[in-house]
């Protein structure tokens, strides 16, 4: 899909730092806009979300969890109506669940906090654990998330999906593919997220969140894939980038090249 000449032509027009800055600005802007909506909903509910130490959506999530734990069906119904009016994207909750599971597995979340915050995900009715396998009963059907799949520490991978995806692709050639997805944020915008597709086992390997999920389920929930590249092709481009620019290629750069070339 990508040719090195196309990358070179793009870098001749746009410096590497400019491309990466565009990506960072877009990500931060998307998060900020989605969080503004969460803040607005909290104000309608007369819920002072600022008293909690997380972002606006996480604070709203905890509030919903408390209502569900208390079986406050009237307020839950009000919240669901509000979420519908603001075009809430329930699909974001599956990735959230994966992140919460990872935090539990690394002991960043104690079991009681995990049990609480997971209740804030309205599309998920129940989560049970059997060893490293977590079974979710959701509005999308039953989903299994396996965690862990790597021993890379959390601070070296969380928030660094493009780096850990790149690291894996340049080390493994056997029927693995890098894939770049636009994951819906709760209300507006997208999280740009790269994962590895294990074609042999039909799994999506999300190394940033240390989890694996069935490919069919992932594609059903997150159909917005920008590109897929084989590990072999990625490694070739990676080596060409290092030889020519001494820059480590990662999926976000490929996406920026694609975006800039599409605008022609």
Image: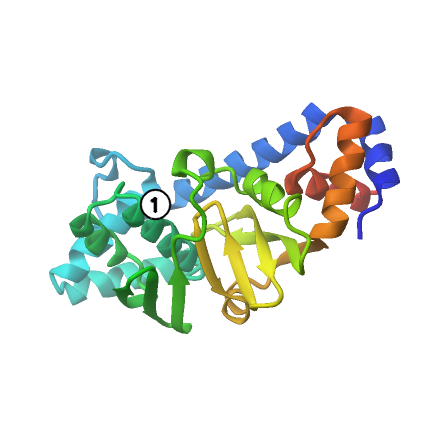
Which is more toward the observer, 46 or 150? 150
What residue occupies the far bottom of the structure in this picture?
141
Label 1 CA crowd tier, 10 Å (few <14, some 14–19, many 20+): many
Residue 174 in view (yes/no): yes
Occupied quadrant, residue 255: top right
- The residue wearing badge 1 is 57
Count of numbered circles on the image:
1
Element carrying mark 1:
helix
- How is the rendered protein coloured? rainbow
Q: From the image, which quarter does the C terminus lie in?
A: top right
Q: Position of residue 118 (x, y in %)?
A: 27, 56
Which is more toward the observer, 5 or 153? 153
Residue 258 in view (yes/no): no
Q: Position of residue 191 (x, y in %)?
A: 52, 46
Instruction: From the viewer's perspective, tell me whether residue 109 is left or right of residue 99.
Output: left
At horizontal 28% and vertical 49% (from top left) the residue drawn is: 104
Which is more toward the observer, 56 or 74? 56
At horizontal 51% and vertical 41% (from top left) the residue drawn is: 30
Q: Is residue 256 above or below residue 128?
A: above
Instruction: From the viewer's perspective, tell me whether residue 131 is left or right of residue 142.
Output: left
Q: Position of residue 92 (x, y in %)?
A: 44, 56
At horizontal 80% and vertical 48% (from top left) the residue drawn is: 2
Q: Position of residue 131 (x, y in %)?
A: 29, 62
Instruction: From the viewer's perspective, tell me whether residue 184 is left or right of residue 52.
Output: right
Q: Is residue 75 above or below residue 242?
A: below
């Amino acid at each position: 899909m990508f040719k090195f000449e196309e990358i070179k032509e793009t870098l001749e027009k746009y410096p590497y730092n400019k491309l990466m800055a565009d990506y960072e600005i877009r990500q931060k802007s998307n998060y900020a806009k989605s969080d503004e909506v969460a803040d607005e909903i909290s104000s309608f509910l007369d819920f002072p979300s600022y008293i909690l130490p997380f972002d606006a959506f996480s604070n709203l999530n905890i509030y919903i969890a408390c209502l569900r734990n208390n079986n406050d069906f009237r307020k839950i119904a009000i919240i669901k109506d509000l979420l519908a009016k603001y075009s809430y994207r329930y699909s974001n909750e599956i990735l959230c669940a994966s992140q919460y599971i990872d935090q539990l597995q690394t002991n960043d979340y104690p079991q009681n906090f995990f049990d609480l915050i997971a209740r804030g995900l309205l599309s998920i009715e129940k989560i049970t654990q059997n060893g490293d396998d977590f079974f979710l009963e959701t509005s999308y059907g039953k989903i299994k998330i396996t965690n862990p799949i790597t021993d890379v520490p959390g601070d070296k991978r969380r928030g660094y999906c493009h780096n850990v995806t790149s690291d894996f692709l340049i080390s493994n050639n056997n029927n693995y593919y890098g894939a770049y997805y636009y994951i819906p944020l709760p209300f507006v915008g997208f999280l740009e997220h790269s994962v590895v597709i294990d074609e042999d086992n039909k799994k999506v390997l999300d190394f940033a969140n240390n989890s694996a999920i069935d490919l069919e389920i992932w594609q059903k929930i997150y159909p917005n894939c920008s590109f897929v590249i084989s590990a072999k092709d990625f490694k070739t481009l990676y080596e060409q980038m290092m030889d020519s620019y001494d820059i480590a290629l990662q999926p976000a750069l490929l996406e920026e090249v694609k975006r800039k070339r599409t605008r022609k």
